[in-house]
Amino acid sequence: MKIMKDSKSGFINDQNLILSTDFYELTMGAAYYQYNLENNIKEEDDIAVFDFFIRKYPKNRNYLIFAGLEQVIHYLQNARFTEKTIDFLRKKEVFKKIDSSFFDDYLPKFKFKLDVWAMREGNYFFPNEPIIKIQGPMFHAQLAETYMLNVVNYQTLIASKASRIRNVAQDKTLLEFGTRRSHSPLAGVYAARASYIAGFNGSSNVIADIELGINSSGTMAHSFIQRFDNEMESFEVYNNIYGDNTILLIDTYDTEQAAKKISKFKNSIKAVRIDSGNLIEHAKKVRKILDENGCEKVLIVASSDLNEYKIKKILESNAPIDAFGVGTELATSRDDPTIAGVYKLIEYNRKPKIKISEDKLTYPGKKQIYRIYNKQGDFKEDVLMLDIESAPPNSEALLIPVMKDGILITELPELNNIQQYYKENIKKLPNRFRELEENHIFKVRISKKLSDLTHLLKDKFT
């Protein structure tokens, strides 16, 4: 994704994204540097391994969709400490005991030198499964945390929501309309990307089109209708300009009367959009009016705070709606707008590390997640194992190498290919996981060796 390369686009220049982080990442990083300097520890002897995983489902979810890796890689390849950012940090009182070489020599030359393993974007996964594994110098691995969590948590949340909507919408056209309600302009672009990965057809967001190739489309606002002295005049003006690409908004005053008015265009317009009221009743009445007046090819697009539950109800009622525009409910994941993604140290200098605090257990050691399929090629179970263990029969390793020492070693797929992978891969997930109400029928299986290591470390620290 390239939208961060030019500060004129309205987003933060990527050279300053190094400070798109929590301040404690910097205080920890400076402390690591100072400690190593005073104890003659080389950076190559200060190696950490972190797992990125999600602790629990959002409400009513039974699986999740991984998204956001491309932006993480872009950050790791491009983020740098500029003269401005270094001067800013140097003046902070908290860093007064940090050796000047940190600011004079280390930060100006800093570049992430991390090994990265990750699931493929668009893959489905479950809580407590690592979706990204990071290995490298402690300072580097620590500093990557906040930006990575921000980008992946959000895109994964939206992709997972979009997948639920796609499941119930079947073969209907789905358009992402959420930019105006997303929590920032950049979030609007990420929502378009994440929803596209999970099978949406397009977006209202224009940056998502020019930068990502997600087709942008739209109709008109009610203000366009109100601008003219009468409704029909607005329809004629718009149709004269856009011809067979015309999509007319028909619910400004009286939906059914507007449908009768636009019937004069016959099949020369593309669609009508209904954005308020009882969408089921309006769609049925409008379809009847259009069909009776020679507009049988004109499509009906519906919007108005749609979500997976409303779309399911609409389709079960056999309402003749051809496309859905989904905005607020998708771009904010309104029913549960957060996701419990975390980034935890699991090994340091080849020694496994564990976190044990009440219900927040972190499985220690470098691990691999294997997906096992049945004879029909459908999902059977996932097994979390130490990476030194042999792969189970009929399984697929989900964490694949992406970067080595900061260098990209796996070509990142185009967005269309990610979507295609999602579409094919999601077919392997049994239908019982796609239910709209939570059942949490699956928990990742833990290998015996990993379980034994976990208990050993728990006993040591408790």
Image (tube, rainbow, N blue to C red):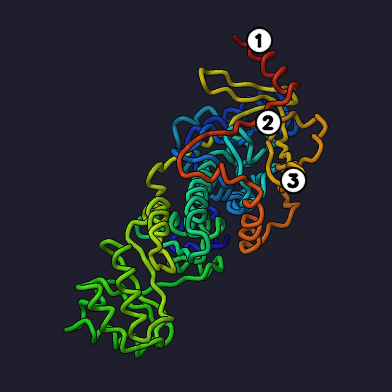
Q: Which residue is mark 1?
A: 460
**In the image, is 398 to the left or to the right of 333?**
right
The answer to whether residue 186 of the structure is visible from this angle is yes
Q: Position of residue 168 (x, y in %)?
A: 48, 54
Residue drawn at x 36%, y 66% as measured from the top left: 302
Residue drawn at x 25%, y 74% as measured from the top left: 256
- In-front residue for pair 310/227: 310
Give yes or no for contact between labels 1 and 2 (Cβ–Cβ under 8 Å): no
Image quadrant in which the N terminus is located: bottom right
User: For numbered disc 3, what is the local secondary structure?
Assistant: strand
Residue drawn at x 68%, y 36% as measured from the top left: 381
Residue 401, disc: 3
Image quadrant in which the C terminus is located: top right
What's the residue type where badge 2 is placed? Answer: Ala
**In the image, is 377 to the left or to the right of 28?**
right
**In the image, is 373 to the left or to the right of 324?**
right
The answer to whether residue 178 of the structure is visible from this angle is no
Q: Position of residue 36 (x, y in %)?
A: 67, 27
Q: CA distance from mark 3 to mark 2?
A: 17 Å
Quarter assignment of residue 45: top right
Q: Position of residue 173 (x, y in %)?
A: 48, 66
Q: Which residue is mark 2?
A: 48
Quarter assignment of residue 237: bottom left
What's the residue type where badge 1 is placed? Answer: Lys
Q: Earlier in the sequence, mark 3 or mark 2?
A: 2
